[in-house]
Image: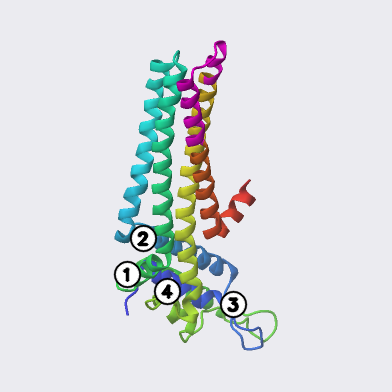
């Protein structure tokens, strides 16, 4: 079976990183080689995550998210015009902002729906990326990692230690282990990976989910910043009505705006809560980064 850069690097790392139990006849792998293979595995998982997220299964939802972001930018530009049009007309400003809140709320809902759909497909996408990797030819990157392991073993074997005994030979296991074979094979359909490849499958799936979650929280943050600007604009218009007693239509306009603003903020809270609930590791990473 020929392996792709992703599958081959993961297979090589899986076989070399697993240290055998220490003993008189136990071989070892030098730390430098282990570090190299661990870095190769990390890079391979990152490549698999990128491949999974770029798959066709995500395109419809990615388009929905792009449209939501485009709507956000369009509303930002519209508000610049509204400030010029209704800067001295608080009632019309309140009415215009009410429409902005409604459209922004729809965009948040669409983004939340698309995010949920993609999170639900993360495991399937990871499986597809790993499956495609197995069908592709190998490259020199994985071969160089294996050569580095073998080379280190040969160097240690040729250097005797003090006394008559020679130093243990540093080399990867001669026979392929279950971890090697299973790490290079994709998990079966249905999202149930083979036991040895479970860690690879889980790492790619988690990477896909965290990427989706980070995108959602970034959108949430951008919308909240804009909502704060809109809220300040609404408060400014409200202050203008205090110079004279507002009529019934003006009061109704501000009541509608306040209602839509609250609904929008509730939806943003739902988006944030849903993402953090479905990707708990993302919340932990953000907490540590903060």
Rounded to the nearest angstrom, the CA distance separating label 1 from label 2 is: 9 Å
**Disc 1 to disc 4, how far (Cα)?**
15 Å
- Whole-percent x, y for residue 50 in the image: 39, 58
Residue 3 vertical placement versus 173 (above, below): above
Identify the mark nearer the N-term, 4 or 3: 3
The earlier-in-sequence mark between 3 and 2 is: 2
State the separation of the CA atoms marked 3 and 2: 44 Å
Q: Which residue is mark 1?
A: 132
3 and 1 marks in contact (CB < 8 Å): no
Name the residue tied to disc 4: 191
Check residue 51 in the rendering and tell me which mark sits there, or answer none.
Answer: 2
Q: Secondary structure at mark 4?
A: loop
Q: Please tell me the numbered disc located at residue 159.
A: 3
Q: In the picture shown, does residue 201 fall above or below 220?
A: below
Residue interval drawn in magenta: 238-261
Q: Nearer the viewer, residue 283 or 71?
A: 71
The relative height of residue 6 versus residue 237 in the rendered view (above or below) is below
Is residue 36 visible in this depiction of the protein?
yes
The mark lying in front, picked from 1 and 4, is 4
Q: In the rendered image of this protein, does residue 65 appear above or below residue 150? A: above
* Residue shown at the point (63%, 45%) measured from the top left: 290
Residue name at image x 43 percent, y 81 percent: 181
Q: How far apart, in angstroms, are the residues tagged by discs 3 and 1?
A: 43 Å
List the single residue furthest toward the right: 163
Toward which corner of the image does residue 276 lie, by quadrant? Answer: bottom right
Please give the name of the residue rendered at 45% of the width and 80% of the height, measured from the top-left corner. Answer: 194
Residue at image coords 37%, 21%: 81
Q: Are marks 4 and 2 in contact (CB under 8 Å)?
A: no
């Amino acid at each position: 079976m020929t392996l792709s850069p992703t599958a081959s690097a993961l297979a090589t790392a899986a076989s070399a990183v697993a240290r055998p139990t220490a003993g008189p006849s136990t071989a070892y792998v030098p730390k430098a080689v282990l570090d190299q293979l661990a870095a190769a595995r990390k890079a391979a998982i990152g490549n698999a995550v990128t491949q999974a997220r770029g798959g066709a299964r995500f395109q419809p939802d990615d388009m929905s998210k792009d449209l939501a972001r485009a709507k956000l930018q369009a509303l930002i530009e519209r508000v610049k015009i509204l400030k010029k049009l209704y800067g001295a007309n608080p009632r019309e400003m309140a009415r215009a902002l009410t429409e902005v809140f409604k459209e922004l709320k729809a965009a948040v809902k669409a983004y939340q729906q698309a995010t949920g759909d993609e999170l639900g497909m993360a495991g399937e996408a990871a499986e597809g990326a790993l499956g495609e990797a197995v069908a592709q030819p190998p490259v020199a990157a994985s071969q160089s990692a294996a050569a580095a392991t073998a080379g280190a073993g040969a160097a240690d074997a040729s250097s005797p230690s003090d006394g008559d005994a020679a130093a243990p030979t540093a080399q990867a296991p001669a026979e392929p282990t279950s971890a090697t074979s299973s790490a290079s094979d994709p998990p079966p359909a249905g999202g149930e990976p083979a036991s040895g490849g479970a860690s690879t499958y889980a790492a790619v799936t988690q990477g896909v989910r965290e990427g989706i979650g980070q995108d959602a929280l970034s959108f949430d943050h951008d919308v909240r910043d804009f909502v704060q600007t809109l809220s300040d604009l609404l408060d400014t218009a409200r202050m203008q009505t205090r110079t004279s007693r507002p009529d019934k239509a003006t009061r109704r306009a501000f009541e509608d705006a306040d209602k839509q603003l609250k609904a929008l903020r509730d939806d943003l809270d739902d988006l944030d809560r849903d993402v953090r609930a479905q990707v708990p590791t993302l919340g932990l990473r953000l907490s540590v980064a903060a």
